[in-house]
Image (cartoon, grey):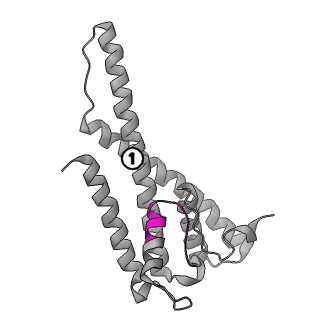
């Protein structure tokens, strides 16, 4: 299968799985009527890390819905970083190739191990930064905003992933404006 087709099918599959999970009764709270279009829109928006939604994320979705949205944000953010890095590696190698050819030197081609090593590095760095941010937010939610430890941890993790991936989803109806000083 061609890499471009594989990427498209992977994104479509993730969006479809996310849509199905979000449309299941266990994923929405009942406070808002969720249509199939709401589930599709939220799934694709989370996967594409746009942060747009047709319903209030804080009240429309249950914890299952929130975890689904979080997973889609993480998949989408990593996918964008992986794709951008693979393109940069490919272009960098092509530029290096022409430079080496000008100098009359032999070159090495881009190997799949280069791409895998880069993806592992990106994932490791991503999870490290998100983990540090989640820890900071967890302590802040616990100490300053009277969350219990479980709630503080969940909010810290969700918002660190959403922020790092620039997704714009929040577990508060006012987004995060209530925390502005």
Which residue sits furthest right? 181
Position above or below: 104 against 127: above
Mark 1, secondary structure of its residue: helix
Q: Which residues are magenta?
A: 43-53
Q: Is residue 33 left or right of residue 176?
A: left
Observer-nearest of 69 and 151: 69
Q: Position of residue 70 (x, y in %)?
A: 47, 68
| Residue 100 occupies quadrant | top left
Q: Quadrant of the C terminus?
A: bottom right
Q: Position of residue 109 (x, y in %)?
A: 25, 27
Position above or below: 60 against 46: below
Residue at 43 percent across and 58 percent down: it is 76
Residue position for label 1: 82
| Residue 98 occupies quadrant | top left
Q: Position of residue 112 (x, y in %)?
A: 25, 39
Which residue sits furthest left? 1
Q: Is residue 20 left or right of residue 33?
A: left
| Residue 116 occupies quadrant | top left
Residue at 42 percent across and 81 percent down: it is 36
Few, some or many residues within 10 Å of mark 1 (<14, 14–19, 20+): some
Which residue sits furthest bottom? 30
Q: Position of residue 139 (x, y in %)?
A: 65, 66
- Residue 51 shown in magenta: yes
- Residue 38 shown in magenta: no
């Amino acid at each position: 299968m061609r890499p471009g087709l594989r990427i498209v099918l992977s994104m479509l599959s993730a969006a479809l799985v996310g849509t199905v999970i979000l449309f299941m009764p266990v994923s929405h709270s009942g406070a808002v009527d969720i249509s199939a279009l709401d589930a599709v829109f939220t799934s694709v928006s989370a996967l594409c890390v746009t942060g747009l939604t047709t319903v209030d994320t804080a009240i429309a979705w249950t914890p299952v819905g929130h975890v689904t949205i979080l997973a889609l944000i993480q998949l989408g953010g990593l996918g964008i970083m992986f794709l951008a890095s693979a393109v940069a590696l490919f272009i960098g190698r092509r530029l290096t190739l022409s430079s080496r050819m000008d100098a009359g030197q032999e070159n090495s081609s881009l190997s799949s191990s280069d791409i895998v090593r880069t993806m592992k590095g990106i994932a490791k760095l991503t999870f490290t930064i998100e983990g540090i941010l989640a820890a900071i937010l967890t302590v802040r939610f616990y100490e300053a905003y009277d969350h219990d430890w479980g709630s503080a941890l969940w909010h810290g993790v969700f918002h660190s992933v959403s922020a790092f991936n620039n997704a714009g989803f929040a577990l508060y109806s006012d987004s995060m404006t209530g925390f502005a000083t």
